[in-house]
Amino acid sequence: MTDKQKMYFNLFFEERINEYKKIDKLKNWNNGTARKKYNLINAFYLEELDITQTELMQLKKYFEYYKSKYDMYYNIDRRDFFLNDPEKLTRWFQKQNDKCDYCEISQADLHKIVEIRGGNLTLNQRTKRSKGVLEIERRDSTLGYEFNNCILACPLCNNAKSNLIDANSWRNYFKTAMKAFYVELLRKYENPMKKLREMQIMTKEEAIHYFLTTTIDPAKNVSGEFSSFTSSLYEIRKITGRDQMTGKRMKHYDSNNWLGTIGYMTLLDMLGTCFRPKSKSNINKNSFSKALNYFANPALNEDTINVLYALRCAFAHDFSLYNINKKRPALTHNFVIQHGDKKPVVTFPEEIWDGNFENKSEKNQTIVYLESFGDIVEDVCKNVVLLAKNKNLEIVLHSGYKELINRYTFTQKLSISLTFTKDSKIVKFPNKK
Ligand SMILES: [Zn+2]
């Protein structure tokens, strides 16, 4: 390593200077000094190492691979292993080649398995391995983390050994079987939904889990199979300005987005059609109201649910602000949509509107806050996922989980984007592969 590389390594990896208060500590400055002095942590590195921005980038680039392993595996017990000779450590990792030294499963395949299982990988019924990373194993656990004593091993190979089966026995007797097991598992997981449709090899719980949690990130979705629950939720969050993964409101949150609201409404229709908590008995209502009855947390009263259902009819049928139902006056409303997240979601009219436009007034208008409605549906979704996790969710579809998968999942193989040329002809561009 060059002198600058050594200096950078010392500050970044040994001293772990990644926040202002650590700079203050390193320099024996009063708290807050570094924050005033440097507008970015990088500025400290530029000054301290007396280098240019470009040189700093080169240093970061030089340690990029090292850092990826450091971030994943560093802990205080491994301090010497990581810090004594970073170049040797890098060579050691390169030699491991991101594979289990026993069964040879790759890091990428291990990720794939854990991803498809929704992070559900547990050893001895308690030790979680939800990240699915290869582990650093000491061949002889009485010795420390030394290069010739360490290998990378998958969580299963790493934990299967005991005072009965030592590392050599594992290698001699079980490695081949472990390898064959992974190959078979990966084949099964290759395209789980397709396999399910063809062979029905998934359990009901697996199907529900897949339906509720399949990632919408195409880069991570190895099977190319998507559930309409997660994809629609992702799109709704996008257009209403929520964080697409968590549902939290972002800075650009659009509380009055009608299209997003219709999305949330349709999602309730979907959930009410598909599921019921095991703890509740069936109610005889439309799917939308069922979903709110079953899953709203905190619970909503019947009048509120009726108003929201009426708004769902008004919006979804023709984007109007009126719902007139001659048979059911409780569903007849002249709506006003208001900004803000005032709770409760509905402000009831002082007087009942008779459905006659001539008689509209401030006293018979029903106010709905779409922002609060969005929050309610987000909570419904969370509750459904939680119920599923605790095995308290029942599929109410006529043909059970097979119908759930056949009706509400789809494959996305080739996506086409549309664009308009000057003369308004539609031109299709297949996505880059
Ligand atoms: Zn292994």
Image: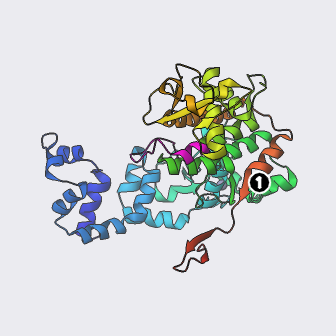
Q: Is residue 352 magenta?
A: no
Q: Report if residue 246 lies within the magenta region.
A: yes
Question: Is residue 25 something one can see in this rendering?
Answer: yes
Which quarter is ligand 1 in?
bottom right
Residue located 51% across and 51% down the image: 239
Which three-letter amino acid code belongs to the residue tagged 1?
A: Met
Residue at position x 51%, y 43% in the image: 246
Residues 247 and 64: in front is 247
For the record, the magenta segment spans: 245-263
219 sits left or right of 31 in the view? right
Q: Position of residue 136 (x, y in %)?
A: 53, 52
Q: Main secondary structure of the magenta part?
A: loop
Q: Is residue 326 above or below residue 161?
A: above
The spot of residue 166 in percent (x, y) is 66, 48
* Residue at the disc numbered 1: 193
Please name the colour scheme applied to the rendered image.
Answer: rainbow
Local secondary structure at mark 1 = helix
Question: In the drawing, does residue 36 fall left or right of residue 175?
Answer: left
* Residue 28: % across, % down: 13, 44
Q: Counting other residues with Cα less than 10 Å from the Cα at mark 1, is it few (<14), some (14-19), or many (20 or more)?
A: many
Task: Tell whether 31 sits left or right of 143.
Answer: left
Q: Is residue 44 above or below residue 283?
A: below
Up-down: is 180 above or below 256?
Answer: below
Q: Residue at x 63, y 30 (%)?
A: 355
Quadrant where the C terminus sits is: bottom right
